Amino acid sequence: MSRLHGSKDFWLGALRADGPAFRAAVAQVPLDAPVPSCPDWTVVDLVHHLGAVYAWVREHVVRGVVDPPTVRSEMTGRPGGDEALVWWQQEFDALVNLLDGIDPELPAWNWAPQAKKAAFWPRRIAHETAVHRWDAQTAIAGVEPVEAKLAADGISEVLDSWLPAGRRRSHQPAYGVAHLVATDAEQEWYVRLRGEGMALLDTDTILDSDDHHTRTLATGTASDLLLGLWGRVQFDVLDVSGDATLLDALRVG
């Protein structure tokens, strides 16, 4: 099984591409315009959310400790009107500069079952920005897919960070193995669901004679797979066989 192992330069490169694309999209519509992929959110809500995430990460990642930071408040005290985009740009630029220069080995809290180091955050912020860039583009009816290698790594992030951290959207128990195949990234994932738990299987270490008990197979582009896991698109955009209800147990957010 081939699985992308990203680097800080890879994730920062993606961030530097998706950040300006996000800004370009939100600048094309009124800030009170709805965001179709985020029910009950307007464009300014999306700007406030992403800018607040940047500010929160920038404040806590430099502390050099692994204890949780103060819970952030996303939607209050944020500028409106044209100032909202100026504020967002300032937060984006400041975070990119910080992540570019930070020591990846610096102790830093994160919520996932990953090493508590600053190296966690360039990846997380790259994916946060990519998905919300897509959200912003739904407001202008001009969405572009998440770049294939980044999307493949985003699928891995869902499976190695979000689901093990208990951030599954559905709490209904599910049992079986889901097999995901990203055709444009030449990557695949096996996920064994065990009630409310899960295990990401490394098929390179499983003998060919082993029975994987695959109950569903979902094939498509890496972007569609990622957006499906994040609930942005329906799984019917994929080629699905077997028990499709297992895919619902993989959704996060």
Image: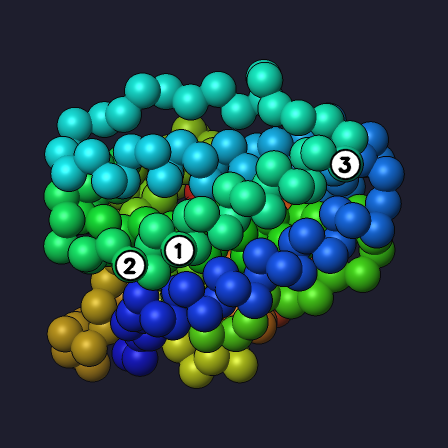
| Secondary element type, mark 3 | helix
First-in-chain label (3 vs 1) = 3
Callouts 1 and 2 close, C-beta under 8 Å = yes
Image location of residue 207, percent across then percent down? 15, 78
Q: Which amino acid does label 2 sit on?
A: Gly
Q: How far apart are marks 3 and 1 (CA)?
A: 23 Å
Q: State whether residue 77 is above or below residue 155.
A: above
Q: State whether residue 152 is above or below residue 208.
A: above
Which circle marks residue 110 in the picture? Answer: none
Residue to which mark 1 is pinned: 97
Q: How crowded is mark 3: few (under 14 residues within 10 Å), some or many (20 or more)?
A: few
Q: Which amino acid does label 3 sit on?
A: Asp
Image location of residue 215, percent across then percent down? 42, 59
Q: What residue is shown at x 57% (from left), y 33% (from top)?
A: 49
Residue to which mark 3 is pinned: 82
Q: In which quarter of the image is residue 2?
A: bottom left
Callouts 3 and 2 close, C-beta under 8 Å = no
The answer to whether one can see residue 59 in this image is yes
| Secondary element type, mark 2 | helix
First-in-chain label (3 vs 2) = 3
Is residue 186 toward the left or the right of residue 68 in the image? right
Q: State whether residue 163 is above or below residue 202.
A: above
Q: Distance between the residues labelled 1 and 2?
A: 6 Å
Q: In which quarter of the image is residue 71?
A: top left
Q: What residue is shown at x 66% (from left), y 60% (from top)?
A: 21
Residue to which mark 2 is pinned: 101
Image location of residue 121, percent across then percent down? 32, 50
Q: In which quarter of the image is residue 17?
A: bottom right
The answer to whether one can see residue 217 in this image is no
Callouts 3 and 1 close, C-beta under 8 Å = no
